Image (cartoon, rainbow, N blue to C red):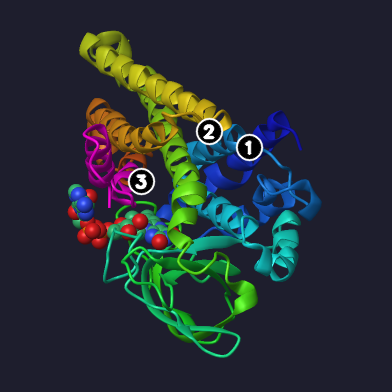
Amino acid sequence: MTHHEAVLEAREIASRVLAPYAAKNDKTGRFSAEAVQSLGESGLLGLMLPVDVGGSGLGPRTFANVTATLAEADASVAMVYLMHILGSATISAARAGATQAVTPILQEIGAGRHLSTLAFSEAGSRSHFWAPISRAHRNGDGVRISAKKSWVTSAGHAQSYVVSSLAPEGTGPTDSTLYLLPAETRGLSVVGSWDGLGLRANASAPITLEDCQVPSAFQLTDDGAGFQTMLNVVLPLFNLGTAAVALGLCRAAVAETVSHLKTARFEHLGQSLGESLPTLRAQLAMMQIDTDGLAARIDDLTDHLEKPRETTMLRVLECKAAAGDVAVSVTSTAMRICGGAAFSKYLSIERLFRDAHAGAVMAPTGDVLREFIGKSLLGMPLF
Ligand SMILES: Cc1cc2nc3c(=O)[nH]c(=O)nc-3n(C[C@H](O)[C@H](O)[C@H](O)COP(=O)(O)OP(=O)(O)OC[C@H]3O[C@@H](n4cnc5c(N)ncnc54)[C@H](O)[C@@H]3O)c2cc1C
């Protein structure tokens, strides 16, 4: 699959499978298994995996485009896709000792039959996902893990979970190890349902691990090297992907606002809202300027990821921090422009507005990113 073909596939799935059901799934908090099935059949689940396991070997540019395209129709599905791509990338980057065990799983992902996700956040350390409270304990040829994972996108729907836990002999708060837990692992269970303000259709429920036995073949990183994988593999793609979700939301908000301004009318004046009110046109223009600004920022980050340089990590941090704010600002403006039609849920704007608020909450949160950027500018240690 080429970049162009991947984006066309995403467009086709977005219009045929996502858009018609997004509002209903949002209302009922229903996870779209059909969306995942279509993404699998199209080859998009294996987008970034190497060709030798059945993937397409495509890069961050295609990932960002596909994710933004999905988000334009349904941000919940886009977030499921994003967490899957991160899980897949982490499994694909596994240490040599895990290659044999994870290769069949990568092949299943390449064949579009396996959905993965990340289970990092813990109830005890909240948004500080880099500091798990749980600790793996050696047990025969592997470890046993008990943990309270507070939010896991695709919980109960994924076939595997990439889980963090403090390394058995780790001494510091970030000395974690990453493991792969198949969904059927004994002791792994979804606890509770997901009833969020936004991204309601992505099943981000908590899971618990109770004495889960994990064989060493499913230890994805060296002992204590989980943090490095979080920083080098997960963070750049997560920040790029959440910015792409924000972009999709902004584009959808602009399109819906344009449509409303063209169709809603002041009958007593014989004009559409857009024809009648310069203030609404000016606010719409700001939405477009901010949306295109975010797209340019995402292009810039993609370029930095394709050609890494000294400023790459700074751009990684900046992009997600900025995207969260832009998405909230653009969708808030759309709420204001569309007034009662948006407020009464007649339009999809209020779903976009709610979904847009998730980006800044998801770790690393906007606050944490700004804190990291400030510290790094001042030459202070980040952790
Ligand atoms: C829709 C959704 C899906 C998710 N999916 C997953 C998933 O698949 N896997 C996963 O592991 N996690 C997932 N998460 C969890 C997410 O990444 C965060 O860990 C979680 O939202 C923590 O929220 P909290 O408000 O409890 O964090 P808290 O730490 O309680 O944060 C509260 C406030 O304090 C601020 N804050 C915290 N620390 C600092 C600091 N050092 N400096 C400045 N401000 C700070 C925060 O910005 C926030 O405003 C998901 C979350 C959401 C909303």
x then y, percent, for residue 279:
21, 13
Q: Which residue is mark 2?
A: 305
Decide whether residue 359 is among the magenta residues.
yes
Decide whether residue 140 is among the magenta residues.
no
Label 3's element? helix
Label 2's element? helix
Q: Which mark is residue 59?
A: 1
Alpha carbon separation for disc pair 1 and 2: 9 Å
- Ligand 1 lies under 8 Å from the Cβ of mark 2: no
Marks 2/3 in contact by CB < 8 Å: the verdict is no
Residue in view at x 58 percent, y 62 percent: 116
Q: Where 372 sits versus 222, above or below? A: above
Residue in view at x 33 percent, y 69 percent: 122
Q: Where 381 sits versus 187, above or below? A: above
Q: Is residue 329 left or right of residue 77?
A: left
Label 1's element? loop
Marks 1/2 in contact by CB < 8 Å: the verdict is yes
Q: Which residue is mark 3?
A: 355
